[in-house]
Amino acid sequence: MVSLSTALLLTLSTTVSAFKAGASGHAAKYSIVPGFFKQSDNNTNVKTFDYHDNLGLNDNLTWSEFKQQIEDLNANAELGVSYKVLYYGRHAEGWHNVANDFYGDAFECYYGQFDGDGNMTWGPDPNLTPKGIEQAKNNSVLIKSLIKDDFPLPQAFYSSPFTRCADTLNYTWYDIALATGYARPVIKEVLREVIGFGTPDLRRDRAYLEERYPDFDFEANFQFNDTLYTPDWSETYAGLKWRGRFFLDDIFTTEESTFISATAHGGIGIGIMSAAGHRPLVMSTASILPMVIKREERLDFTPVQIDLEGTPGPFSTSVTKCAASISYTTLPESLASTVYTLGPDTTGLPVVTVTTVVTASPTSA
């Protein structure tokens, strides 16, 4: 059975208490400003919605008008009220997405604990697939087409510390904003995927990331090694929303830019949407979700503090994210070539009910 040690449980309990105490003075309220994007409208059918169609901008608006209206909102905002536009992007397809599609629940419950199966490598920190690279490049083409219509470019860029996100950001934005020195993306630990359990969510060390991404910066106090990953517990939906809230607090209190890009994951994306008051959407790989976010605060507002230096977050569970008990003893010898033509990944929503006990012991890896 997957379980937490007594010491780790005590640490978790202490962290929860500290968070609740620190959050008591938290007074900021976030909400989505309606009327700008179709996907923010509850009447829009998300199953048929295509973000490639002008990123979902309402048909009665041009990008020039959109930009002016956002600027007007901030110029005329009451004391303690501010607005930002967050272009939230999910990373393009990675090898773990292909493996997840192929193995289904068995990937979350069992196979995800390994680095691969001999045919695919999905951990730690898997690379983009050829399809994923093409998805990100297509996004670059899309953005360039929108620039002709006065699309307001992000003024600041943030990335998860996982390479599938930083690579997606690079393929999408490099020759638009990075190559010219217009912006240097910042890698932020808080944007990482659901913490815990599977090797796809074990990140690379800082030295590797610095060498691979010379055009990126790192947030202050970014740790050298991944001090958060553990196979013994998994973050819950409440934890994702907490981190989403922290990210919003961070960009609204420390980032001067109005138009912001963040490239991360489906799980933390749900957390950010929930914290912002956006209806939760399961984002396909490489999709982009623009959100117009309003923040209202009191003068005595104190940002929530977050511990990302090696202890479990305040909302964690000692079991895996699986939906049913599964037992396996061997890994399959081969995969069918059809894995390359599977449909879009839809595993972004975190599973709130966690009841599985993994009973198998691997006989091969």
Image (tube, grey):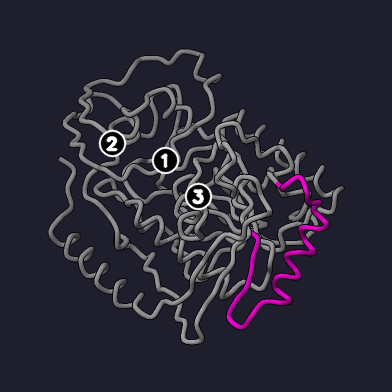
CB within 8 Å, label 2 to label 1: no
Q: Circle 1 sits on which residue?
A: 200
Picture coordinates of residue 252 (x, y %)?
57, 71
Q: Earlier in the sequence, mark 2 or mark 1?
A: 1
What residue is disc 2 on?
322
| Marked residue nearer the N-terminal end (3 or 1) | 1
Crowd tier of the residue under label 2, counting other residues whose Cα lies within 10 Å: few below 14, some 14–19, many 20 or above? many
Could you say whether the residue bearing mark 2 is in a helix, strand or loop? Answer: loop
Task: Provide the residue designation for mark 3.
Answer: 279
Q: Position of 326 compared to 86: left or right?
A: left
User: Element type at marker 3?
Assistant: loop
Task: Please state the extent of the stretch shown in magenta in the rendering.
Answer: 57-85
Whole-percent x, y for residue 120 in the image:
45, 26
Residue type at numbered disc 3: Arg
For this rendering, which residue is in front, 2 or 250?
Answer: 250
Which SS class for mark 1?
helix
Whether the magenta-drawn stretch holds residue 68 is answered as yes
Residue placed furthest toward the bottom: 300
Q: Residue at x 77, y 39 (%)?
A: 141
Q: Position of residue 260 (x, y in %)?
A: 65, 60
Asked if residue 15 is among those painted magenta in the image, a careful observer would answer no
Residue 333 picture quarter: top left
Q: Earlier in the sequence, mark 3 or mark 2?
A: 3
* In this picture, residue 233 sits left or right of residue 35: left
Q: Amino acid at mark 2?
A: Cys
Q: What amino acid type should be assigned to the residue bearing mark 1?
A: Pro
Q: Residue at x 49, y 19 (%)?
A: 339
